[in-house]
Structure formats: C-alpha cells, structure tokens
Image (cartoon, rainbow, N blue to C red):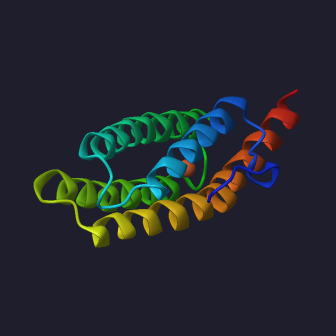
Amino acid sequence: MLWWTETLATGILTVDEQHKKIFEKTGEILSLNATSDTKTIHETFDFLSNYVIEHFRDEESAMVKMNYEDFESHSQQHTYFLTEFFKLATEIKQEKIEEETLDNLKILVVEWLANHISQSDKKFAEVMHSLAVSSS
Ligand SMILES: [Fe+2]
C-alpha cells in the first residue's frame, strides 16, 4: 500500500493536497485486479487521468510563472507518465482486462509517482520557497 508521508510534502498547500488525492486513488488502483468490477476499473482510470492532467497543468503553470530552470525536463517527466498511462488505459478500454496490464499500471503509478513526487516535485518546491523567501 502506498501511503502519503510528510517526507513527500513539498510545502505548497495545493500541490500537497493534489498529491494526497493522487495517492488516495493509487490505493484504489492497487486494489484492482482482473476480476474487479469493470465499471469500477474504468471509473478509477477516468478519475485518475483527469485529475493527473489537471495537477500537472497546475504544477507547470506555477513553474512557468516563476521561470523555473528545470521546467523542460520536469514537463518531459509529466509527458512520459501520461504517455505510458494512456497506453495502458487504452488497452484496458479496448480489450478484456488483463491482469498483466493492471500490474504494469500499478508499477508505473507506484514507481513513477513516488519517485517523481519525492525528487522532482520536491526540488521544484525548494526553488519556489527560496524565491518566496528572497522576495519577501
Ligand atoms: Fe511534477
């Protein structure tokens, strides 16, 4: 099970709230398997995909506003996640739901999310804080 911990906090309230919500949904993804109700699987996917898109957009607009130097590579990471996520989402929508597809999804979401939030998002938050401190 993937739990939110304070070590993952960026200190930016909206970003942290969104991360918590993503983790909450991740818990639901981890509990899915090929015998789960199809409607539940699709609803979980739809919610997570819309939510993640909105979250990435919020993060990226904050980066553009502050002229974040790592914007390009950070936004590439978002694009990578979305590309992989939608590949799996398409497989799930088109065919009978395979255990392997759900397993790949779980690995992507857990590994990517935990790494991205604990490293890249934290780095961005640190720069944002240092700017806030120096301008106050
Ligand atoms: Fe991010």
Q: Please give left or right for residue 18 compared with residue 43 in the image.
A: right
Q: Residue at x 44, y 52 (%)?
A: 29
Name which residue lies at 73% across and 35% down: 12
Quarter occupied by residue 116: bottom right
Task: Farthest residue to the bottom: give it.
Answer: 100
The x and y percentages for residue 6 are: 81, 48
In the displayed structure, would residue 80 be above or below residue 18? below
In front here: 29 or 49?
Answer: 29
Q: Is residue 39 above or below residue 1?
A: above
Residue 62, position as x, y percentages in the image: 58, 34
The quadrant of the image that shows the N terminus is bottom right
* Left or right for 132, reference 125: right
- Along the line of sight, the residue nearer the viewer: 106 or 118: 106
| The C terminus lies in quadrant | top right
Residue 20 location (% of width, % of height): 64, 40
Q: Residue at x 27, y 43 (%)?
A: 42
**Observer-nearest of 135 and 19:** 19
Which residue, as the protein is rendered here, is positioned at the far left?
94
